[in-house]
Image (cartoon, rainbow, N blue to C red):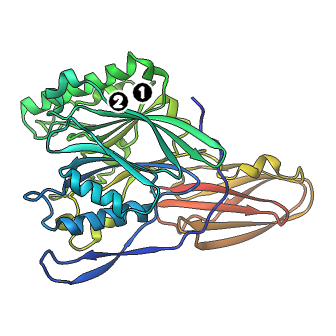
Amino acid sequence: MKQLLPIPSLKVALTMCFLFVAIPFHSAHHASAQISRVGSDALFDVATWNIEWFGAANNGPNNDNLQVQNVKDILEGSEIELWAVQEISSTTRFDELLAALAPGWQGELATQSGSQRVGYIWNTKFVSKRSSTHILTSFSDDFAGRPPLKAEFDVTLADTTLRVTLINVHMKAFGDAESYQKRVNASERVKNHIDFSSLGTASVIFLGDFNDGLTASTYANQVSPYANFLQDAANYQALTLELENKNEYTWIGGSPGSNLDHIVISSELSGSYLSGSVSTMKGLRSLFGFTAQTSDHLPVYASFGSSTALDTDETDLPVAFMVRDMYPNPSSGTSQVTISASKYSAVDIRVYDALGRLLSTKTHQVVAGDHTLPVPVQHLVPGAYFVQINSGYSQTTRPLMIVR
């Protein structure tokens, strides 16, 4: 496969605000709520989201018009390019959502998923669908009548093209022995389908509502149905294991919550995964009325691109100045950048947040030679940032993840 290449430099984005109904009645009370921009034009961002009983007349959120509006706002406001969605109960409401989105968005639903369909929504500015099909239909019962929807996409960012295959699932729910065994069977079916087909050497993202944990099962603390993927670390990486280990819950319909929604990638994508980028859109949890009006699941997303650079111009930098490395990245509180200068330089190190807001600047006077300079990150909260290194005659921007 072709790995994602470094992408052009930092872009400054504006905060986007949207309206949510704060009280689940037929009144016109509204509350202004900010939806964080978590995607980036410089990266390929993919998300999975169970949108609870989307559009169902007698289940889930009781105001379908509002649910459609809220989902639209989240999809557009987050700026994630490709979504795998689950629990779509109304094709009519799904079509309304697509029509309400800005020009350039497309979507597709499964045709063999009963009353709760899986599907995809993507921004055609960056993503184009090559093909889609149901797989493992002979084993539909193991998937609760919802066989996986496989789709192949081309992702284009600047001069970079990546071909990925997504396998979207909504596994059997409930914490009983029979349901657990169906999840075990389904997980084995998916892994075999990948391992023993042309997907064995492809860039694959297996994602969706797994309806179970990775570290242990919701059924009697049994071995996770997805242990087969975790145990094959040479070929797969379970990105959301990080969230589960931190108790960053994806299902928030009860207290304290649980981790049911996951993203697993094949080893072909490991080099392109931006380490530490997997997250939930946890800011939505604080919105009054979110679980009642939108979903009891949070979107889960991850980003792919160069793990060390966001600036394609670095190879064209004058020989007088070069940024060689920034480490550690992700950082838990300290980071430093290594540069080479062939003459005296004043080097500015600027830290920006994901919205492009300048947080700090530090200037260093350096002479000719190699230098290791500190990056001021001690005060930063966990999240995604950009570090800009400016010598006055050249500039490089690097992504930085802060974890605690």
Q: Which residue was labeled with disc 2?
A: 230
- Relative placement, left or right, of 47 versus 395 is left
Residue 135 image point, x, y percent: 29, 26
Local packing at callout 1 (Cα closer than 10 Å; few below 14, some 14-19, many 20+) is few
Local packing at callout 2 (Cα closer than 10 Å; few below 14, some 14-19, many 20+) is some
Relative to 322, is 287 above or below? below
Query: Alpha-carbon distance for marks 2 and 1?
Result: 6 Å
What's the amino acid at mark 2? Leu
Q: Secondary structure at mark 1?
A: loop
Q: Which residue was labeled with disc 1?
A: 233
- Relative placement, left or right, of 399 versus 120 is right
Residue 95 image point, x, y percent: 28, 55
* Of the pair 120 and 201, the residue shown nearer to us: 120
What's the amino acid at mark 1? Ala
At x 51% / y 34%, what residue is drawn? 269
- Relative placement, left or right, of 172 versus 34 is left
Dot 2 and dot 1 residues touching (CB under 8 Å): yes
Q: Which part of the image, by quadrant, shows the C terminus?
A: bottom left
Quarter location, residue 361: bottom right
Q: Is residue 62 visible in this depiction of the protein?
A: yes
Relative to 130, is 282 above or below? below
At x 19% / y 54%, what residue is drawn? 52
Q: Which part of the image, by quadrant, shows the N terminus?
A: top right
Relative to 380, is 8 above or below? above
Relative to 147, is 247 above or below? below
Residue 155 image point, x, y percent: 53, 43
Residue 239 image point, x, y percent: 40, 41
* Of the pair 376 and 188, the residue shown nearer to us: 188
